[in-house]
Amino acid sequence: QSALTQPPSASGSPGQSVTISCTGTSSDVGGYNYVSWYQQHPGKAPKLMIYEVSKRPSGVPDRFSGSKSGNTASLTVSGLQAEDEADYYCSSYAGSNNFVFGTGTKVTVL
Amino acid sequence: EVQLVESGGGLVQPGGSLRLSCAASGFTFSSYWMSWVRQAPGKGLEWVANIKQDGSEKYYVDSVKGRFTISRDNAKNSLYLQMNSLRAEDTAVYYCARDLSPASFDYWGQGTLVTVSS
């Protein structure tokens, strides 16, 4: 199972929005509404930010939103804040109890 | 408060074995699928294995099939990963995680580092 494709980096100024893409295939992202997004700060464990494409766990700010179109999912962070600077990973169900993560995107707040 | 605490990592020679443990607290452990996810140094995340609530179903990523075994003890609120025939490419931080829904892991431990090297 190949990793989902994410851009290596993305950036924005405080208050701006940044959108990260996650491209897979019809066997994973396009085939199921089971796409999640994780935030990971250096040396820390990942934190779930979005699940099932667009649902936010309790405690995650509504500045974070998710969507999907075809084989590509997206995470948008609105109103960028300094603490949003981190690595972001998508993941998707890939059928037959297989799960695949994305390659990761480093978000920089300028 | 949900807590997952991994232990058992360390330095092991190629071909060797290691058993990781994950102690869970703050939730009804027996009600959740549980997973192991790993991250090689400076690399991305990779799902390794997961196990059903009662241990009756277990699934693995292809690269560890036949070498790793996931198990759980609901009486002890513990998750395990037995790793045999370890290879250099198994070097990673191993995280224990609770499954919320397919491909969604809502709580993670702090991770334990496994280094496979001679």
Image (cartoon, coloured by chain):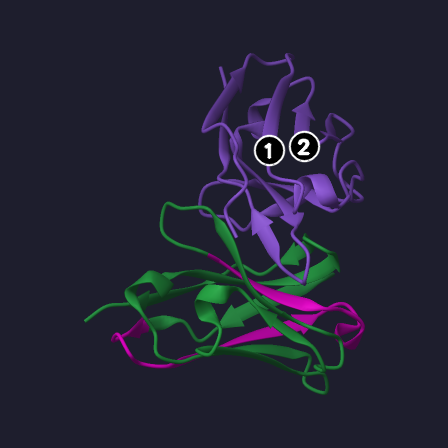
Chain colours: A purple, B green
User: Is residue A104 something that shows in the picture?
Assistant: yes
Residue A18 position by quadrant: top right
Confirm whether circles 2 and 1 share one chain: yes
Q: Position of residue B4 (x, y in %)?
A: 62, 66
> Could you classify mark 1 by the number of other residues whose Cα lies within 10 Å: few (under 14), some (14-19), or many (20 or more)?
many
Q: Amino acid type of disc 2? A: Ala
The residue beneath circle 1 is A22
Judge left or right: residue B77 versus residue A2: right
Q: Are discs 2 and 1 less than 8 Å apart at CB?
A: yes
What range is drawn magenta here? Answer: B11-38
Closer-to-camera residue (B27/B87) = B87
Vertical order, A103 against B78 (above or below): above
User: Is residue A50 something that shows in the picture?
Assistant: no
What chain does mark 2 sit on? A
Residue A66 position by quadrant: top right
What chain does mark 1 sit on? A
Residue at x 62% of width, y 65% of height: B35
Vertical order, A94 against B53 (above or below): above
Q: Position of residue B118 (x, y in %)?
A: 18, 71
Q: Position of residue B45 (x, y in %)?
A: 50, 50
Closer-to-camera residue (B1/A109) = A109
Vertical order, B57 against B27 (above or below): below
Q: Amino acid type of disc 1? A: Cys
Which circle marks residue A73 in the picture? 2
Does residue B24 belong to the magenta stretch?
yes
